[in-house]
Image: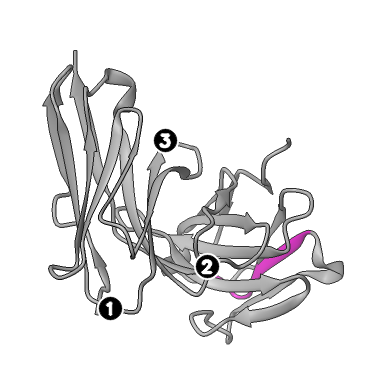
Amino acid sequence: EAGVAQSPRYKIIEKRQSVAFWCNPISGHATLYWYQQILGQGPKLLIQFQNNGVVDDSQLPKDRFSAERLKGVDSTLKIQPAKLEDSAVYLCASLPTALSYNEQFFGPGTRLTVL
Amino acid sequence: DQQVKQNSPSLSVQEGRISILNCDYTNSMFDYFLWYKKYPAEGPTFLISISSIKDKNEDGRFTVFLNKSAKHLSLHIVPSQPGDSAVYFCAASEAGKSTFGDGTTLTVKP
């Protein structure tokens, strides 16, 4: 079974530029999460999708971050414009359904550096 | 207000000995607890979990203990192996939404 795919793996941009990340979850997984992991901290939830609908985006800085999951499969996360404090690893995870007893399957992450 | 805390940023143990990683939480609505292991440049991978209705779950060398009254859980690794060296994240889940601690870096010395 193929795992969660993310691209790019690394990205370096200057502040005020835009950037987009892509995630392809495990086939058949209805629930998809985007996390931000700042160095030395744990993953922090940005947004949760169930199929192509948003379940929770309460922690997403909506003035600069946006995410979509068209057709309920792969997803993109965009930052526009980027700030220095956005430097982090962006992790995508998926679940068959949003059941609390299921472990999440994580992708390798995209490491973003904002200069 | 951090709902899940791992108070030890790092832990070093000798190969063959026991590793004990601790985690505290504040939200009594959490109904499921998980431990993830993370190697550099990789995403976290699931290790072991426990439901809030249980106090112990064991899987091979890994055992998780839950003390609901103290809002505390711990992960025991026995015996520890050099390949266990990684960052360990505790996560607490409520209705499918997980909150993570900041991780403990475990180093197992040969």
Give the Cα distance between marks 3 and 1.
32 Å
Q: Mark 2 lies on which chain?
A: A
Give the Cα distance between marks 1 and 2.
40 Å
| First in residue order: circle 3 vs circle 1 | 1
> Magenta stretch: residue A79 in it?
yes
Residue assigned mark 2: A15
Where is residue B85 shown, x and y percent of the image?
29, 28
Residue assigned mark 3: B40
Above or below, A2 against B57 in this view is above
Q: Which residue is located at x 14 percent, y 50 percent?
A: B8
The answer as to whether the residues below labels 1 and 2 share one chain is no
Amino acid type, residue under disc 1 in the picture:
Ser
Q: Give the range drawn in magenta.
A: A74-82
Picture disc at residue B71:
none
The answer as to whether the residues below labels 3 and 1 share one chain is yes
Mark 1 vs 2: CB contact within 8 A: no
Residue assigned mark 1: B28
